[in-house]
Amino acid sequence: MEKFVKVIDNAIHPTLIGAIEDLTTSSSSKLEWKYQTHIGSNKNQLYSPGFAHHFIGGSTPDKITSKSFGYLLMQPLYSFAEKQNIIITKIYNGRAFLQVPTIKTNEIFPHKDSDSPHFVLLYYITDSDGDTIFFEDDKKTEIQRVSPKKGRAVFFDGSIFHSSSVPSKTHRIVLNYNWHGNII
């Protein structure tokens, strides 16, 4: 299959967009965020603080690990797959990432979420700076840049190196799904 990056605006129903935003941004939400000094995959990279919430997968693919909120946080992937006529066969990971703005913006180390063949769906919960950048295999040549926009999703081949960039103006919240499926 040829490598691809597909951007979809208004990827899910507006009611769901609001429910997920409320869950991840409301001060009264019970969603548990865990602090990470480095949101990216390379611990030797520049300081990129943030928070993470894992809600599916990890050591046990397809297992909901966030009992209270996992099913709601899975809805963007399920909704996307239904609209795109994709049958999901395995979900490896579902994670929420919240990056806080810093004075100096940097790109996080280009990476792949897994070396196994898979798809990635990034769902942007809020408008923000802090683009997602896609790279050639050399990890230097930029292919495409996508700005976070509330309700936007980016569907791409998991073999593409990618990186977030650290926001400077407002927090950046994204849902990241690593999965496999059949496009029908």
Image: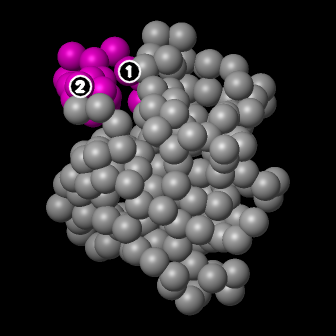
The quarter of the rendered structure image containing the N terminus is: bottom right
In this view, 12 is above or below 60:
below
Q: Residue at x 67, y 59 (%)?
A: 158
Whether the magenta-drawn stretch holds residue 16 is answered as yes
Closer to the chain start, of discs 2 and 1, is: 2
Q: Quadrant of residue 115?
A: bottom right
The quarter of the rendered structure image containing the C terminus is: top right
Q: Quadrant of residue 25?
A: top left
Q: Which residue is mark 2?
A: 15
Whether the magenta-drawn stretch holds residue 97 is answered as no
Return the x and y of residue 95 as percentages of the image width and height: 53, 37
Q: Quadrant of residue 75?
A: top left
Return the x and y of residue 109 as percentages of the image width and height: 57, 70
Secondary structure at numbered mark 1: loop
Residue type at mark 1 is Leu
Tell me if mark 2 has few (under 14), some (14-19) or many (20+) residues whose alpha carbon lies within 10 angstroms of its own.
few
Give the left or right position of residue 117, taking residue 17 as reference: right
Q: Which residue is mark 1?
A: 31
Residue type at mark 2 is Thr
In this view, 184 is above or below 88:
below
The magenta stretch is: 15-38
